Image (spheres, grey):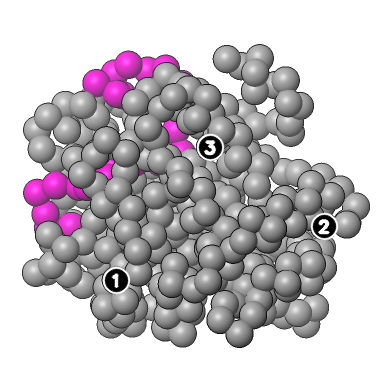
Amino acid sequence: MRYRTYKNTELTVSEIGFGLWTISTGWWGNFTEGEATGLMHKAFDLGVTLFDAADTYGNGLSEELIAKAFPKQRDEIVIATKVGYDFVHHGEARGRGQREIPQDFSPEAITRATDAALKRLKTDRIDLLQLHNIRMEQVYDDAVWTTLEKLKAEGKVRHYGIALGPAIGWLYEGVNCIRERDITSLQHIYNMLEQHPGRAMHEAVTEAGKETMFLIRVTHSSGMLEGKYTAETTFPPTDHRSHRPRSWLLNGIKKIDKLRFLENSERTLGQAALQWLLADDRVASTLPNIYEEAQLIEFATAPDCPPLTSEDIARIDDLYADNFGLEPEEPKFKGTMELPKESAVAESA
């Protein structure tokens, strides 16, 4: 394992982190407490120090799992969690498809949610508190950011940032937050198959001269970049991938065939997908979806595999620019996203 430190901070994280949504929400199968904490212990043994939760994952379950898995290792792990969804009054989003429950980013709600998370985590501090899927309204609401600074001054939060989703998009929320606020971290979807709008957010950091770094989720495009799907692959009814159109599977397999050159005797395609992300020094850590031990071992050892060459990266860029030789697909975006005209981002400045 290798480690990176957020710029201008003392916050150091493993290049491969563990996102708890896979083991606490039911979207990737159901896990007993023993199975979940067992995977977390194995990750820790492999050098993983970053554990990323959210208060809405399993109605607090993801945070409770961290407390149960690491009762004596608090100073050896980095705890990231998220607040913003009012699951206390409306229930979590599990089983609701892409429908979201109401949010509350009032100063009182942020403070209340943070205190509740600390209690579930059985700790006195959250290393990275992330606002979960903020809208543009929150980007420009000074009260939100004053509240985060107050929590930081009180020692309850060491650093803060935002996490954007739940579907790809959210370009302007991300870009404008980078420009307007001094956030340590921005979590978003990004991978070799889904580079927009993530790349634009990364470039916005450089253009604005900011120190913000990124946590990357959906690193393998919902498992596609692990390279194991076939046209016969099916998913259990409770698995979120079962709700995707068949074209997602068939087109994805065709794209993966074009990326097989990244595999060799020393590196799997799944490891190459993580190395492609880590080639960007603006990335602090990656959060691959982990739901079994063999896969965990594969991902955790990715930083030690032979790195991608500049020729590899250029070839990936060319394939992506040509949509891997396939007909263009109609994008589905959320947030204030619209598909790019290059001038659109500039005009939002």
The tag on residue 190 is none
The quarter of the picture where the N terminus appears is: bottom left
State the residue at coordinates (52%, 24%).
207
Alpha carbon of mark 1 to alpha carbon of mark 3: how far? 26 Å
Q: Which image quarter: residue 303? A: bottom left
Q: Name the residue under label 2.
A: 324
Q: Which image quarter: residue 266? A: bottom right
In the shown orientation, is residue 324 left or right of residue 201?
right
Mark 2 packing: few (<14 Cα in 10 Å), some, or many (20+)? Answer: many
In the shown orientation, is residue 147 left or right of residue 173?
left
Question: Which amino acid type is shown beneath numbered disc 3?
Answer: His
Which residues are drawn in magenta? 121-146
The tag on residue 47 is 1
N-term-proximal mark, 1 vs 3: 1
Q: Name the residue under label 3.
A: 202
State the residue at coordinates (48%, 78%).
298
